[in-house]
Image (cartoon, helix red, strand yellow):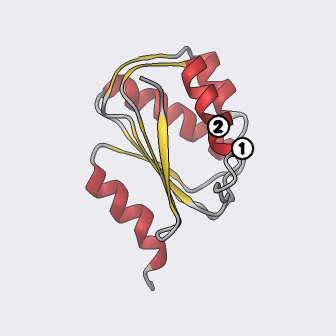
Amino acid sequence: MPVFYKIDRGRRLILTSGSGPLTFDEAFSYQQRLFSDPDFDPSYSQIADFTQFTSFELSAAEVQRLAEKSNFAPQSRRAFIVPNDVSFGLARMFEMLRADLGEENLRVFRSLDEALDWVLSKDKPE
């Protein structure tokens, strides 16, 4: 099944999910679809739930290619939720590559609750 997304305009949030194996072609196609969607706003935050994928068929070079471009604004918070150590390692690699390019608001989590708390806390006063 392909990667899919929902844009929640009320919460200024993009919810991303999918199932089955995650391949480079599928991830790249998702990036293109999202960024060309007329409802996409680069200032929105993102929660990407990878817990339903059965495998991650991505090489380190492919993760690097995916990390080379982001249309999200620097203040956008992006949370990736991962189910296991392999996906955690790939997501952390993506996070570090994006940080090298100046994106400091991407985090990897193991639970939806932690991800939601972090992404939505940007709207709470300090």
- The residue pinned by badge 1 equals 36
Q: Residues within 10 Å of mark 1 (few under 14, many from 20)?
A: few
**Amino acid type, label 1:** Ser
Locate residue 26, reporting x and y percent.
Answer: 55, 22
- The residue pinned by badge 2 equals 33
Locate residue 20, reporting x and y percent.
Answer: 36, 20
Report the front residue among 105 and 71.
71
Locate residue 27, reporting x and y percent.
Answer: 56, 27
Residue 85 image-quadrant placement: top left
User: Which residue ends up furthest to the front in the rendered image?
Assistant: 38
Report the front residue among 84 and 116.
116
How much space separates mark 2 and mark 1, taking CA atoms?
5 Å
Asked whether the residues under the numbered discs 2 and 1 touch, taking CB atoms below 8 Å apart as contact, a structural biologist would say yes
Relative to 25, is 38 on the left or the right?
Answer: right
At 29% from the left and 32% from the top, the residue drawn is 83
Relative to 16, is 20 on the left or the right?
Answer: left
Residue 34 image-quadrant placement: top right
Quarter of the image that includes the N terminus: top left
SS for dot 2: helix
**Amino acid type, label 2:** Arg
At 63% from the left and 27% from the top, the residue drawn is 28
At 59% from the left and 24% from the top, the residue drawn is 63
Quarter of the image that includes the C terminus: bottom left
